[in-house]
Amino acid sequence: MTVTEIGSPRRRKEDQRLITGRTRYTDNIVLPGMLHLAMARSSFAHATTTAIDTHEATSSPGVVAVLTGRDVADEQGSLPCAWPITPDQKAPPHPAIAVDHVAFAGEVVACVIARSAAEARDAIELIDIDYDELPVVLDLEEALTDATLAHPDLGTNKSATWVFDSAEAGTGDDVAQALAASELVLERTYLQQRLIPAFMEPRSTVVDPTGEQITMWSATQVPHLLRLMLALTLSIPEGKVRVVAPDVGGGFGGKLQVTPEEVITMLAARRTGKPCKYTETRSESLMAAHHGRGQVQRLKLGATREGIVTGLSVDLLADMGAYLGLVTPGVPILGAFMYNSIYKFAAYRFSCTNLFTNKAWTDAYRGAGRPEATFAIERLMDDLAHELDMDPVELRRKNWIKHEEFPFSTIAGLEYDSGNYEAATDRALELFGYDDLCAERDRRRAAGDRVQLGIGVSTFTEMCGLAPSRVLGALSYAAGGWEHAQVRVLPTGAVEVVTGVSGHGQGHETAWSQIVADRLGVPFDSIEVLHGDTQTSQKGLDTYGSRSLVVGGMAVVAAADKVVEKARTVAAHLLEASTDDIEFAEGRFSVRGTDQGLALGEIAFATFSAHNLPDGFEPSLDSDATFDPENFSFPHGTHLAAMEVDTETGEVTLRKYVCVDDIGNVINPMIVDGQVHGGLVQGIAQALFEEAVHDESGTLVSGSFVDYLVPSAADLPSFTTDRTVTPSTTNALGVKGVGEAGTIASTPAIVNGVLDAIRHLGVQDIAMPCSPHRVWKALQDGASKGLGAEEPVPDRVAPEQDAGPMNSSGNLPTGDFQ
Amino acid sequence: MATAQSTRTTSITVEVDDMTYTDVVEPRMLLVQYLRERLGKTGTLVGCDTTNCGACTVHLDGQSVKSCTMFAVQADGHAVTTIEGLAQGGELHPMQKAFHEKHALQCGFCTPGMIMQSIDLIKEHPDPDEHTVRDGLEGNLCRCTGYQNIVAAVQEAARTTRESAASTTEEGAA
């Protein structure tokens, strides 16, 4: 086995088609006789529909049919939720087209099928819908009271409550006792605002009902799950459905879903017998594709005066939105295992109540539960450090698991196989120039500079490589967490790799080629990676949760190793030697101690011709493997941010960002850096820019890219990224996963930095995003309370809009728009 | 009435990627719709409906425009270059090469627009510093890369373009 490809910054195979415009995104697909769909969407967050008049729309030019919920009520089923977290979990039915009742603004109430997209959209305007408005529940604290119900028929807004208690689980002490005995208890409430995944490619679906199988192309992360769920939801034999994820323009969890629009396009194609296409507009995407985050985090942290944490209690309210999506209920539960992060806590309790509101449904968004957990604990650690007047890095050092303590069983019941928090932190401090920046901060603070400097610290770990199937079973998830691969050796010696993961920007075609090139000793360019089509990639569980390499890559390794063993048998036969005497290196099988040997390509051709094979040998080298991980993997890292805050305007500037991640062994460092950069920006965006804002009637105010602030290049600096390498011990590649790392760690690093800059001015907390207005308002409030403000900030004219709740009061801001 | 409007049509002649097309279009048809739906130029993509994302950026007579913010009829008599017309004689444009070399793309959806805008940017700023690049790309959103490698790619393409211009000048002088 040569080891030349793994670890090299190979330029990507995927790029050629993407930089020349020879792409196959779903909306690019045109089929003969194809019809186009447009959706009529509810303009009310909560209402009953009393009448839908489609007469005028039906007779509009080019219109083939108009479908309402009642038209398809018998065939549309209910959209699937694969993760019932408790046996008594409550959920309303989720029809693809609403039938008589709508529960969020943007829900589909009718669909027009027409000869062109323009004609379909024209006809949408002609549908006349009578609504009877119902009261809306938008706020989580209010939802908890059940005073107003998101779904009156359900009788409650509470979907489920899920609890982990270290005393009950036997992993640690009782948290109530631990907190009662603590010298110090911090009580905090933090808010995780709603975010919108905002993948650049709007969702699009094409369904072709001609031929023996119905084929769906869709902008999805999960073609295999989608196929299974379509079969179950619509009672179509699974073998009659083929799903293709062609080029997919980003996902970030937002395309980990079975959507109403996919089901509706399928129904329309089956009804008309013609290929049908639906492509959403950006406004529709922001309004109706699932959102992420949306939590109230009520926290109690106990500690000694020396800074040793004694216990942590977490009480969450999690916003499901109006419906449960594919994994909606499980998203906050993924966080349950991460609040203890890299630390050794003696007692821990996690409780989460999932609540319905009249907003768009939520589900996975990059990190899914783990960013929320990391934010909470890292904010708490900084608050504790401040309380004890201790360096925040020093406080973390006192509490974290030392490298010699691995493997380590955590209070949340996971076994961390490896890690070296000291090494990553030391490297980050050095690259950052921590001492110098702290000294500068202190100088500027003492001088009362208008622009203050703050240092934000965040460490993190996450559970990646979702997931050991038995663990998922224990958490009541319906599917497993294995992954499948097939390695085929063609007669020419070229290799095809089929993978069950479904990339949409991650560079799998390149990275898998690197792995197989090393494993089989064939040239990188002789390897073709096939994915994203249930007809060629017949088995798989797709891409999310930083699982592709850790689970899918391992399946590729296992399949390649089987190829080698089959080829060894053929080689021994052809070389008239014992298999024990056959060595394999650099793509060549040799008889030990001789110069006799055959290349893999020669063996492949001999196997293809099958003229001279061992008796009983099946004439094929092709091999399948299904890999089920024995444990999660646990990347970790230390992130440091230098934040400048203008105390007069509230403007926040990210001056310097350093992160040192430990993701184990690296297949392609160039791709890894790209993943980290992009992840950092999504986490920074939560801290500073992005929020799904609703008005008091439940209408999404931030409904376009004018108002939903996906950062541009001009909003950001470049980052300093580096790595330490502590290989995972639970997979042969020693890899851990990198897709979510940047997003998880950067949000608390940024907010901690902002607070560090202005805490001495009386600011205890700022609800995200830390917009200039919120920071300015927090400074005003801090000054008026006189908390530590030696030089009061003078009165100024307030910015135009009122801010709404500025601090984490426990109420999610709804009408607050900066 | 939309239906009345849709019956009015106009004839336009547009040069797109070195081919001349004459077509009858509705006045309301956007340039990007014309490129994608009539000409099959699906390399140019649509990412939003408010002119914010820049995925649809093309060149009109050599200058970058967002093709979702122009009507097809406004392109009548003009020359349009899309991502599909950049490579010449089988040779990638220096900006395409730089995006590949610097890993300036992941999912690739913003890439056509980002490349077209970047070419315009270095034409105006042949040796841009990081700040200039970031400002110049403000109208093009990317959700994958965090922009760092895009900035590096634009500066790399600017460098190779300057060097190749310099060597051409030298050859001309010799």
Image (cartoon, coloured by chain):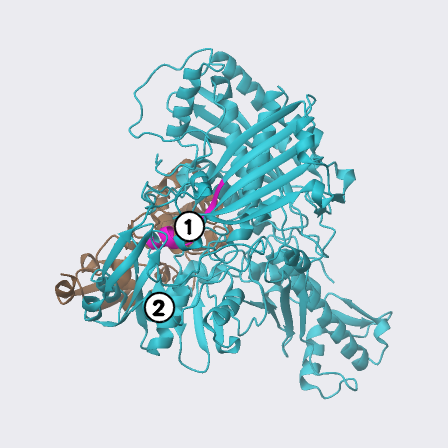
Chain colours: A cyan, B brown
Give the camera-side residue of A730 and A148.
A148
Residue at the disc numbered 1 = A198
Residue at the disc numbered 2 = A277
Work out which quarter of the rendered image holds the C terminus of chain A and state it.
Answer: top left
Q: Residue at x 50, y 16 (%)?
A: A444
Q: Residue at x 46, y 50 (%)?
A: A362
Judge from the rendering whether residue B68 lies leftward or rightward of residue A595; answer left or right.
left
Q: Hey, which quadrant is residue A768 in on the image?
A: top left
Give the camera-side residue of A102 and A512.
A102
Whether residue A559 is in magenta: the answer is: no
On the same chain, marks 2 and 1? The answer is yes
Decide if residue B133 is in sight here.
yes
Q: Chain of mark 1?
A: A
Q: Chain of mark 2?
A: A
Disc tally is 2
Neighbourhood count class around disc 1 (C-alpha, 10 Å): few under 14, some 14–19, many 20 upward: many
Which amino acid type is shown beneath numbered disc 2?
Answer: Lys
